[in-house]
Image: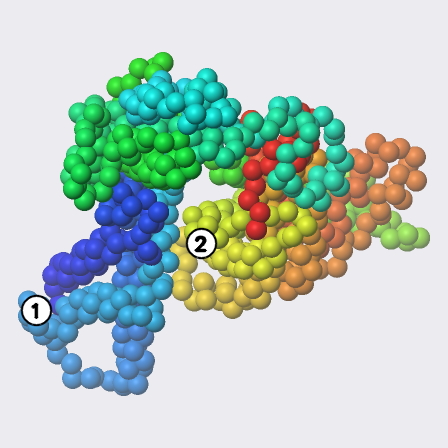
Amino acid sequence: MNSLIYAGVILFGAVTLVIEARRNYSVSAKHHPFAFYGILEHLEARHLCSPREWNFGFYVYSLLYLISYAILLTSTELIELIYSSKAAANLVGATGTALGPESDPFNLSGTDYGKPLFISAFIIAFYSVGATRNIELHIRTLAHRLAGVPRGVYQVLDRLQDPDFLSETTPPTGPLMASFRDKLKQLSDDDIAPMSMDDLMAVTKLPLEPGRPANKAQGGQSLIASFLIQKQSGLESNVEDNRPRGKEQYLFDICKALRVIDLLRPAITGGQRATHFPLLGMKELGDISASLEDAIGKSGSRREPRDESPKTLHDEINEFEEYDEASLERLREKAIEVANSARAVFAVYFICNSRTVLNVDRQSALQKVRAFADRGYKVEQNSFAGSLFFAAVIATFAGFFIHQSFKLQEVQVYPDLMAEQIYDNLGRVENSYIACRDLHYKPVKTEPPTLPDGITQQKCERAFDKGLDKYRKDNKSQMMAWTFFDNLALLLMVAAVVQMSIFEKDVQMDQNAWRRWTMNRVPYVRLLTGAILPALAGVFALSIGFILRLIWNADFDVSTSQIEFLFVENWKYFVAYLVPCFVLSISTFVLIDKHDDWTFPATLSVAFLASVVYVFSVWLVPMATLRFLPPIEVESFWVVWWNSGSFTQAINSDAFWLTSYVARDLLILTQLPVLFLMLFAIFVEFSETPATRLNKGQNGEPDRNNDKEARE
């Protein structure tokens, strides 16, 4: 078999899988994500994110096929080698096999050349049948999620639906709003009674969002109250209830919708679209602009009496003649429908144009819209990155200090561990080390040992001190490696658990399946089921850390049998870590869900409680699978303090530090996750924006009067 031809066949099989992955990746994994926005229903998934994000998601998705291809192809080669070796073991002497290749290497009909093609065809069929298709769907959903499909457009739509959107962008009165106000001015006083025309025009101006508190709550609440408070939706006496009622509510909603359309329309329709979004050249995106223009209609156009085509927004405004609930409701429905379409079109253009709007005046309303839509500071993600980084740095220094202190204490109790270093400092005189050791650690009520010639008690003491210092220097690199790989495995575990928890919550929020909750009604089922995948991901990441340590210890020459032995020896430990990963995932859910509603002491208290539970879970489950040596027998810190009478001397003595292998390992295994939980609570609290603090009073206390949370 020719190796170059075989490599070409392997490459051809990989290209076949990439083409299949490209075809599947362009299809949405589930129902169309924007069924509510009918104007977007004909767009494909690739039109809902920027090209860079789309390509990144495709790279992740194609890895599913390529990794499967590599595993199956190498497995067949390995099985063939094992089979050949077993067959050869049963043969004795000459076999009669001719030298050289058994077949013509350029005969492409050989079975060896067809193996990569068969495997690629098998993979395509495997991920297409119903029983295993769910695996491919989950990977495709994850890839779309990484590409921002449809999360990126959803985020922009959520921001454009924010109550503060119009008040912050302060758009001027556009043609739709001007046309509607002209229609209102044509109404008589009898039509709008008991309101006056001035009152009616006041409603059409940019109003304060209905129900906004006139004063923040002044009364502080206790820590326990901030946990258990049940949010109320009613407005109390210290809130100015300026919500329109009756017909004025319809009028208020119409004016908001028309102002949104007037604000966004110039950038997403007509000739200005190419000026503000020059990166868009796809015909499909131009079609949604045309659809939006058709829904708005043309100003001044008159509808024919027998015209049965759908009415445009301008048609509805022109036909608005009476100030009654039926006319207002009909116009309101049409205005909100077109306003939602305008928001959707702008969101798609904004995302596909790499989240920017070009060629806009810095002081214009459109520039404020761009800034509002790009207000994308991700509190949870940035808090995760910052807290994990600082926790890893602190845990690395602390872990090295723990390893070094414990090792120095251990070697002084068991001096034979540094016998070579002491022997060198004694000039390698025969029997000098044994004599000095017995002198330095002589039993009570025994005669001192006889020292060799030239060896004094002072020289023994100096040799022990220098030997200890040399032992510390000789083992410094080893302790650094221990510290690095201990923290690397924990770092991978924490990153996998927390990232998967945040991803799980975001996916369920996209599906409207993750509701806000209170401490009175904790969604235990949701939290427990949501923590399953993060816990499994954490265990997998932890095992990756162990494999990396094995590769380092084997000088990057590790065999499959070594990896197999690693899992055989530690599988109980890995399985036991499901419990701490569950605790870490649920703690993450609670912190990212409730930090907006709790005060800083409350959030920090929950993080501390979660840390205690995590430490207990590690001690109770994973560490129960390990075997430990008996504690080092030294005088306790209290005995040294009592005998010396000096607290400083007791601290500086070797007996101050850990003497138990269990306590040492528990501290090493829990310090990074505990530091992460505490820092994460601090970061999410300090990352809150004024918008997220609306639920809190001036003193940071929860404010029941301005609660925006949805109740189940």
The image position of residue 388, as x and y in percent, is 54, 39
- Whether 214 is drawn above or below 417: the answer is above
- From the viewer's perspective, is 432 left or right of 693? right
**In the image, what residue occupies the spot 36% across and 64% down?**
134
Badge 1 marks a residue whose secondary structure is loop
- Left or right: 50, with 415 as reference point: left
* Residue projecting furthest to the front: 190
The residue identified by callout 2 is: 551
Image disc number at residue 108: 1
What's the residue type where badge 1 is placed?
A: Leu
Residue 157: give its label.
Answer: none
Name which quarter of the figure residue 84 lies in: bottom left
Q: Nearer the viewer, residue 699 or 66?
A: 699
User: Viewer-proximal residue, 96 or 210?
Assistant: 210
Amino acid type, callout 2: Ile
Q: Which of the 4 image quadrants contains residue 152? A: top left
Question: As displayed, is residue 145 above or below residue 170?
Answer: below
